Image: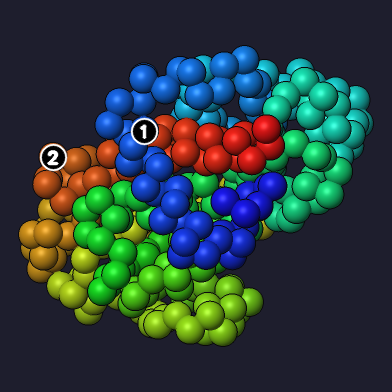
């Protein structure tokens, strides 16, 4: 990669993406055999929001490469509770680590921190903004199951607040992909995201009903309703549960459909779908390790 930090998927060209995915495929074959890649390297984890998959897969990836992690721990037990600024916290932790991973509830937080630190920084989610490392593992999963060109993908759920959606939609403009966005009108893509996608030449089509497009899809990417980002709890309750996938829903879908979800799910995909050949969301979560190994390998190698 040609970048010191990974903040936004719009930084990445098709060449950048394919380089990461190709390297991830090498790591995926036997992730435990690369312990000599970055011995003694330390990755600093700064998670201001809850995380299971992202945090644990970064930790696993770093350890698979021979390094280790230092973790600021819960915000409640850190100096953030004493009023320490995000920039100051990052500048302190960069003194302990060779690279940083930041998740923060404020959009633009990773861009801000990147102005203050010299070690590589990876954005692990900034509010309703971007989640580029999730996007790369999503692209890896799509490539393994459906291919990235001549692709028809449906992205369904919370398109307004879903940062995984915004990141993925931008990244897919590097490929021959037709994108269908399915959501209630109140959770459609933000105007700014829609405008940027059109400027990037994306084929964007918006729908309120999945049934009309489901038979044509190669991939269905489902997201949960982002309850924590709603300013009004009543608004959330009106929409929650409106878009759900079960076996009956899938009756008109292709047998080769790939169903994805960045997880965690609430009730948008019924457990009965888990046993179908189409369900790939747990495979998707597992792909976080080789993809993040590839990212860390490239960024740490650039920094040596």
- Is residue 233 visible in this depiction of the protein? no
Q: Which mark is residue 213?
A: none
Q: Element at badge 2?
A: loop
Residue 42 sits in quarter: top right
Question: Do callouts 1 and 2 mark residues in contact (Cβ within 8 Å)?
Answer: no
Q: Nearer the viewer, residue 297 or 84?
A: 297
Residue at 86% x, 39% y is 87
How many other residues sit within 10 Å of disc 2, few (<14), some (14-19) or many (≥20)?
Answer: few
Instruction: Pinpoint residue 56: horizontal percent, then vertical percent.
Output: 49, 26
- Is residue 276 visible in this depiction of the protein? yes
| Residue receiving disc 2 | 275
Q: Nearer the viewer, residue 155 or 167?
A: 167
Q: Is residue 131 left or right of residue 224?
A: right
| Residue receiving disc 1 | 27
Residue at 67% x, 32% y is 304
Please, is residue 263 above or below residue 17 in the view?
above
Residue at 65% x, 52% y is 3
Please, is residue 97 above or below residue 19 in the view?
above
Q: Nearer the viewer, residue 148 or 110?
A: 148
Please, is residue 264 above or below residue 180 in the view?
above
Residue at 15% x, 72% y is 215
Q: Nearer the viewer, residue 287 or 180?
A: 287
Badge nearest the viewer, 1 or 2: 1
Instruction: Pinpoint residue 196: horizontal percent, then vertical percent.
Output: 59, 78
How many other residues sit within 10 Å of disc 1, few (<14), some (14-19) or many (≥20)?
Answer: many
Q: Element at badge 1?
A: helix
N-terminal of the pair, mark 1 or mark 2, is 1
In this picture the colour scheme is: rainbow
Instruction: Pinpoint residue 73: horizontal percent, then vertical percent.
Output: 68, 20
């Amino acid at each position: 990669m040609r970048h010191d930090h990974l903040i936004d998927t719009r930084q990445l060209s098709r060449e950048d993406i394919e380089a990461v995915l190709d390297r991830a495929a090498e790591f995926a074959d036997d992730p435990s055999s690369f312990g000599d890649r970055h011995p003694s390297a330390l990755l600093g984890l700064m998670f201001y929001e809850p995380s299971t998959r992202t945090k644990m897969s970064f930790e696993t990836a770093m350890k698979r490469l021979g390094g280790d992690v230092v973790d600021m721990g819960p915000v409640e037990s850190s100096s953030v509770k004493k009023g320490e600024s995000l920039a100051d916290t990052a500048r302190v932790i960069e003194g302990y680590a060779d690279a940083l991973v930041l998740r923060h509830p404020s959009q633009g937080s990773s861009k801000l921190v990147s102005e203050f630190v010299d070690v590589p920084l990876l954005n692990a989610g900034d509010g309703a903004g971007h989640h580029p490392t999730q996007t790369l593992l999503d692209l890896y999963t799509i490539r393994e199951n459906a291919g990235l060109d001549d692709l028809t993908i449906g992205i369904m759920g919370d398109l307004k607040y879903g940062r995984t959606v915004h990141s993925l939609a931008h990244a897919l403009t590097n490929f021959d992909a037709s994108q269908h966005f399915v959501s209630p009108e109140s959770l459609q893509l933000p105007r700014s995201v829609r405008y940027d996608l059109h400027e990037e030449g994306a084929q964007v089509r918006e729908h309120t009903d999945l049934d009309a497009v489901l038979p044509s899809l190669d991939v269905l990417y489902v997201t949960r309703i982002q309850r924590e980002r709603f300013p009004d709890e009543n608004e959330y309750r009106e929409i929650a549960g409106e878009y759900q996938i079960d076996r009956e829903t899938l009756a008109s879908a292709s047998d080769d459909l790939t169903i994805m979800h960045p997880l965690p799910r609430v009730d948008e995909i019924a457990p009965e779908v888990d046993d179908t050949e189409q369900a790939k969301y747990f495979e998707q979560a597992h792909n976080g390790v080789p993809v993040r190994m590839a990212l860390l390998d490239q960024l740490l190698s650039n920094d040596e």
